[in-house]
Image (tube, rainbow, N blue to C red):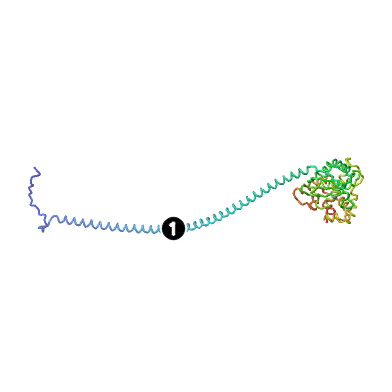
Amino acid sequence: MNSLEPQQNTEPIRQLRWEKPRRISRVYPLLTTILLLANAVFVYAWQVTQVRYISEADTYAKRQESLEAQVKSLSASKVENEKRLALQEQQITDQNTDLTKLKSEVETTTKNLAAREKALRETEAQIAEQKKQLSASASEIDALRNRPPLFNFKNTSGRSEVASQQEAIKTLITKVYPEIESFYGKPYLLSSVTIDFVNELKIPNSIGEITIENSAQGIQMKISLTKFSTSDYLQVNTLLHEILHAWRGKAVLRSSALEEGSVVAATDALMFELAKKGILPRYNERYIQISNEERISEFNTRYEVHADTLKFYGNPSISEIYQLVGSAWYELHEEDPTFFFDFNEQYYALIKQGKAVDVATVRSIITSLIPTVNGKPTSQYLASEPAFNPR
Ligand SMILES: [Zn+2]
């Protein structure tokens, strides 16, 4: 059968347009059921929506609660952190302050250190310069000390017999020079000694005089004599006495009492040695004529030993004073035959250092060289002798 062919309905075509049903349709219960079903679906959907809404509201409240708790907790930790931050900031500030202080301290210390280093370098340079100068002047002094002094002769008196007396002195000095060196040490800064024959001396009754001049040419010594003979004890003693003064030259002891005492004693001791060696005749004489006992019991109490040069030489009892001081120094030589040599070496060493050697220093040099004098401690001996305590 062909589908294009018009269908042949046996039933009458139901009218689709609304019209009052003419009889109770069999479709109605079906429609009612559908309506009930739709209603049930609607109620269910509405209920579900309600549940969902409630559960969503519940979740929201919980979230809110949780968020609030989080906010609270975060707020608390924010406060805590702020506190910690403030504390750390304070610590940083404190540490910065400390650091600034330390920096300033370091700066100050560095500055001080630099200043001290500078001062140290300056002092070192100064010391080096002083050492240089000291060694230069020491070698100069040594060179001068090792140079033999030049003995010159003059005849101010105009007397003709002086020529042979000058020859006698030259012969004696040539023989005696090395002996003086080994007994008294090398001369101190001696440049020239002039031995002048004069008709009259400044000090009446004296046999010889010495004048020391410190000129641009160096130390000039002038020994004045009226006459000379090797056989005359007092004349030889006087010449050697003046030469021993000249030996110390610029370094003569600052108190005349000390210088004269030591030279008087040394001349006697030297002459004794020279006579023993046959360089000088045996005179059977001494310059010092008083005994130690006489000095202690009489001279030391009777005579005043002045510290002042003019008062010392101007003393009307100057001859006795020479005996007193000479005798006191001679005791030191008796204790130790090398005393004068050792004394001069120590004394010159101090002078070379530019030290002003006073009477107390002379006493301390003596004490360092000789422990006792006549069984007495040397300091005690020196304290009791006017020769070592000029006033
Ligand atoms: Zn003298």
Above or below for 325 versus 180 = below
Per the image, label 1 sits on a secondary structure element best described as helix
Nearer to me, 24 or 14: 14
Check mark 1 vs ligand 1: CB closer than 8 Å? yes or no. no
Q: Quadrant of the N terminus?
A: top left
Q: Position of residue 368 (x, y in %)?
A: 80, 49
Q: Is residue 33 left or right of residue 317?
A: left
Q: Quadrant of the C terminus?
A: bottom right
Q: Is residue 56 left or right of residue 27?
A: right
Q: Position of residue 112 (x, y in %)?
A: 61, 53
Nearer to me, 297 or 122: 122
Answer whether residue 373 is visible to the viewer in this image: no
Q: Position of residue 176 (x, y in %)?
A: 85, 42
Q: Residues within 10 Å of mark 1 (few under 14, many from 20)?
A: some
Q: Quadrant of residue 302?
A: bottom right
What residue sits 11% from the left and 56% below the top?
A: 17
Nearer to me, 8 or 235: 235
The three-letter code of the residue at mark 1 reads: Lys
Answer whether residue 17 is visible to the viewer in this image: yes
Q: Quadrant of residue 3?
A: top left
Location of mark 1 (residue): 78
